[in-house]
Image (cartoon, rainbow, N blue to C red):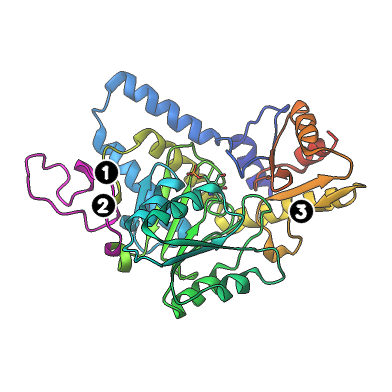
């Protein structure tokens, strides 16, 4: 990390020295500028209320631009701001025109947000086919499972338990060739790994902002390829999602042509201010630098863990298979007891994927990882 970046990071992440934060795959701490943006917004609300609402809308629009830049979307208007990943995936599951006997393909290790909306389709006689990724070529396993009734492949870009990163371009290309829709739960990679919805031929992408994007809970990015947007029947309705939002008298309405059609009512302005501040940091640092630093940290963590007797790494070791997650277990240690021991030492981590999951971000100092590993 160069001196300029180190000084920015020092300023933006004034974490308590007794809090060893290795849990960005769950909920991240906010940068200083995000806390400042929320503080200013709170102050403004108490002093002038919503008097300057047009300015708030500019911040919301800026957030859409930042989001589009982060995921490679062509236009900010193609990004909807939803409450969370589950809501976006539910929109897709509930909105497609399923025929009885259709199939949805996924892996058997998805976070429940990317399983339950599809399982709920069993009422419409749509079957969820879950494929194991525990093999030499997980993309091929998914591609081989595409059958004549497969309508959609939905997959996490990075698995929440093991941290396995998939080759989205390869999956997207195969889907396009076989006329299968490609839906990406990108919550474990947007803000960590450079992302380009065009390059990976995605049809839909959803990602909540409270992990690698360093934002608060309560606001997710939802992108649907504009070419197929109209294939999604709408399932939420209100004043804000219509073409003439703001015309409260009209009895005739049509959905907004752009992604606003998925935003039924008043926006989450507080979170929009916060997430916009968080994304401004990632974009200022640059996603290539963020990703480089994160890879450095994950490589460091793996190297330290590998030297420890009895440690079994449960995450993939190959650099092209990793993102920001390192999951491990220790021989003779019960995961729950180990987790409690780490927590007692101030290590913020998670028990996932059959072990302990550590997830540093780009700014995490090596000293924090060293201290955390001293806890067991
Ligand atoms: C892969 C994945 N998808 C989704 C979520 C969370 O979904 P939501 O934004 O609906 O809370 C998580 C959280 O851990 C996750 O790891």
Q: Where in the figure is residue 245, as x and y percent of width and height?
A: 17, 45
Residues 137 and 372: in front is 137
Q: How crowded is mark 2: few (under 14 residues within 10 Å), some or many (20 or more)?
A: many
- Mark 2 against mark 3, which lies toward the viewer? 3
Q: What element carries label 3?
A: loop
| Residue range corresponding to the magenta coloring | 230-259
Q: Say which label, 1 or 3, has the lower sequence index.
A: 1
Q: Where in the figure is residue 278, as x and y percent of width and height?
A: 49, 42
Mark sitting on residue 227: none
Q: Can residue 170 be seen in this view?
A: yes
Q: Mark 2 points at which residue?
A: 261
Q: Is mark 1 on a helix, strand or loop?
A: loop
Q: Which residue is drawn at 86% across and 35% down?
A: 376
Q: Where in the figure is residue 105, as x and y percent of width and height?
A: 51, 65
Label 2, label 1: how far apart the Cα atoms are: 7 Å
Q: Mark 3 points at which residue?
A: 314
Label 1, label 3: how far apart the Cα atoms are: 42 Å
Q: In this view, does 93 lie to the left or right of 301?
A: left
Residues 118 and 329: in front is 118
Marks 2/3 in contact by CB < 8 Å: the verdict is no
Quarter of the image for residue 93 reads bottom left
Q: Name the residue under label 1.
A: 264
């Amino acid at each position: 990390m160069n001196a300029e970046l180190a000084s920015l990071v020092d300023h933006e992440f004034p974490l308590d020295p007794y809090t060893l934060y290795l849990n960005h795959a769950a909920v991240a701490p906010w940068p200083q500028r995000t806390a400042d943006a929320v503080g200013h917004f709170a102050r403004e609300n108490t002093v002038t209320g919503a008097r300057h609402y047009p300015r708030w809308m500019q911040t919301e629009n800026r957030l859409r631009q930042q989001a589009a830049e982060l995921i490679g979307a062509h236009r900010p208007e193609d990004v909807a701001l939803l409450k969370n990943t589950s809501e976006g995936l539910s929109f897709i599951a509930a909105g497609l025109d399923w025929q009885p006997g259709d199939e949805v393909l996924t892996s058997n290790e998805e976070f429940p947000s990317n399983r339950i909306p599809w399982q709920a389709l069993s009422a419409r006689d749509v079957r969820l086919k879950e494929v194991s990724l525990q093999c030499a070529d997980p993309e091929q396993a998914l591609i081989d499972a595409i059958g004549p009734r497969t309508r959609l492949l939905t997959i996490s870009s990075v698995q929440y338990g093991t941290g396995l990163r998939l080759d989205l371009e390869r999956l997207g290309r195969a889907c396009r060739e076989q006329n299968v829709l490609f839906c990406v739960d990108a919550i474990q990679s947007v803000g960590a790994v450079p992302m380009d919805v065009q390059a990976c031929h995605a049809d839909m992408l959803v990602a909540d902002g409270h992990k690698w994007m360093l934002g608060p809970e309560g606001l997710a990015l939802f992108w649907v390829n504009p070419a197929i947007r109209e294939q999604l029947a709408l399932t939420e309705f209100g004043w804000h999602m219509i073409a003439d939002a703001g015309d409260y008298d009209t009895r005739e309405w049509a959905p907004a042509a752009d992604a606003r059609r998925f935003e039924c009512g008043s926006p989450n302005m507080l979170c929009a201010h916060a997430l916009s501040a968080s994304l401004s940091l990632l974009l200022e640092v640059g996603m290539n630098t963020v990703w480089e630093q994160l890879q450095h940290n994950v490589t460091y963590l793996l190297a330290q863990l590998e030297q420890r007797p009895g440690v079994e790494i449960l995450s993939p070791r190959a650099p092209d298979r990793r993102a920001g997650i390192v999951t491990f277990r220790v021989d003779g240690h019960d995961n729950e007891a180990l987790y409690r021991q780490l927590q007692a030492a101030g290590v913020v981590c998670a028990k996932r994927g059959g072990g302990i999951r550590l997830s540093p971000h780009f700014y995490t100092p090596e000293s924090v990882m060293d201290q955390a590993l001293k806890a067991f």
